Image: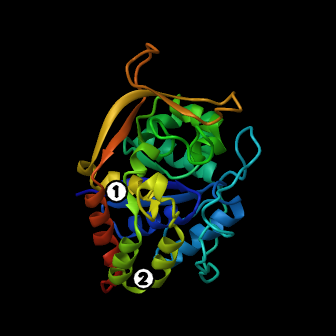
Amino acid sequence: MTAIPIIIDCDPGIDDSIALLTAFVSPELDILGITPVAGNQPLLQTLRNTLQICELGERSDIPVFPGCARPLLREPIYGQFHGDTGLGNTRLPEPVKPPETIGAVDFLIDRLTLAAGSGHRITLCCLGPLTNIAVALRIDPRIATGVDRIVMMGGAYREPGNRTMTAEFNMLVDPHAAHVVFSSGIPIVALSLDATHQVILRPEHVSQFARVSGRIADRLAELMAFWDRDQVERYGSRGGPLHDPLVIAWLLVPRLFQTRRAKIFVEYESELCMGQTIADWYGKSGQEPNADIVTQVDAEGVIAFFLDRLSRYAAEGVA
């Protein structure tokens, strides 16, 4: 079977790192490049974290292109749950391989233009703020025809926000970029807090992952243990939601997810509701749907999937 060509746009981030480590050992995915953006940390840190995770996963063959250092119009804000470096208490060696000299936006435009001309369209896996994608689309809207679909983590509909009362973090960081992307006409699969809060990485799961993940076990366990939010009143148990890794899971085991089509709007003017995502579930706007929103997740199936994939680091000759 032909591997799915993907570009991973991310802002590592603990959950981004778990998503990357999973993608690295998934031969169904052809990772054309990784495009870090400012989000959980400033760009220099998310870029460094990306390079370090590539080396941890022994995938320094994947090119890494530095992205946008700030949102389109607003002042930057950064993540609260990932520690001082974005990788919790985990300390990794300095990256050996440097980033590419071309920037993420130029890379996206070049590759998506090529994909549009060849008919071999690319899936964009978006794990952070959508700034890189939006800037590329604003420079050359024609690249949209080179995108097969965007599979993204972001937004909150029936769930409240996780950074403000109404907004999920990725949407809050750059709501104007999110508006550009949702208005692009590109097919979108949206994994919001409504989906990710159904899959909680509990302490007992961390122990399971540590037992099976071979040479990355210590680092993976450190990342996952730091992710414990200890907010039983919100999540129903100890642990933290598996936000960004669900993008990779959806690509590889879509049978574990249920979706519903709707028109998504992004608030980018009201300070009270900045970054809020609104789903028109019942067609009140009169506008056509622009996304498939994940509504239900088989949480046990997803955990089993990640256990299987990350156990590949215990095998000889992985990656």
- Residue 232, percent from left and from top: 46, 59
Secondary structure of the residue carrying numbered label 1 = helix
Secondary structure of the residue carrying numbered label 2 = helix
- Residue 174, percent from left and from top: 65, 41
Quadrant of the image containing the N terminus: bottom left
- Residue 298, percent from left and from top: 27, 52
**Relative horizontal placement of residue 167, taking residue 126 as reference (left or right):** right
Labels 1 and 2 touching (C-beta < 8 A): no
Q: Residues within 10 Å of mark 2 (few under 14, many from 20)?
A: many
Q: Residue at x 48, y 45 (%)?
A: 114
- The relative height of residue 89 versus residue 148 in the rendered view (above or below) is below
- The residue nearer to you, when weighing 186 against 271, is 271
Q: How many marks?
A: 2
- The residue nearer to you, when weighing 111 against 132, is 132
**Relative horizontal placement of residue 214, taking residue 274 as reference (left or right):** left
At label 1, the amino acid type is Ala
At label 2, the amino acid type is Ala
- The relative height of residue 192 versus residue 99 in the rendered view (above or below) is above
- The residue nearer to you, when weighing 183 against 268, is 268
Corner quadrant of residue 161: top right
Q: Residue furthest front?
A: 233
Q: Residue at x 61, y 69 (%)?
A: 49
**Residue that mark 2 sits on:** 217
- Residue 11, percent from left and from top: 59, 58
- The relative height of residue 264 versus residue 209 in the rendered view (above or below) is above
**Residue that mark 1 sits on:** 249
Q: Is residue 186 visible?
A: yes
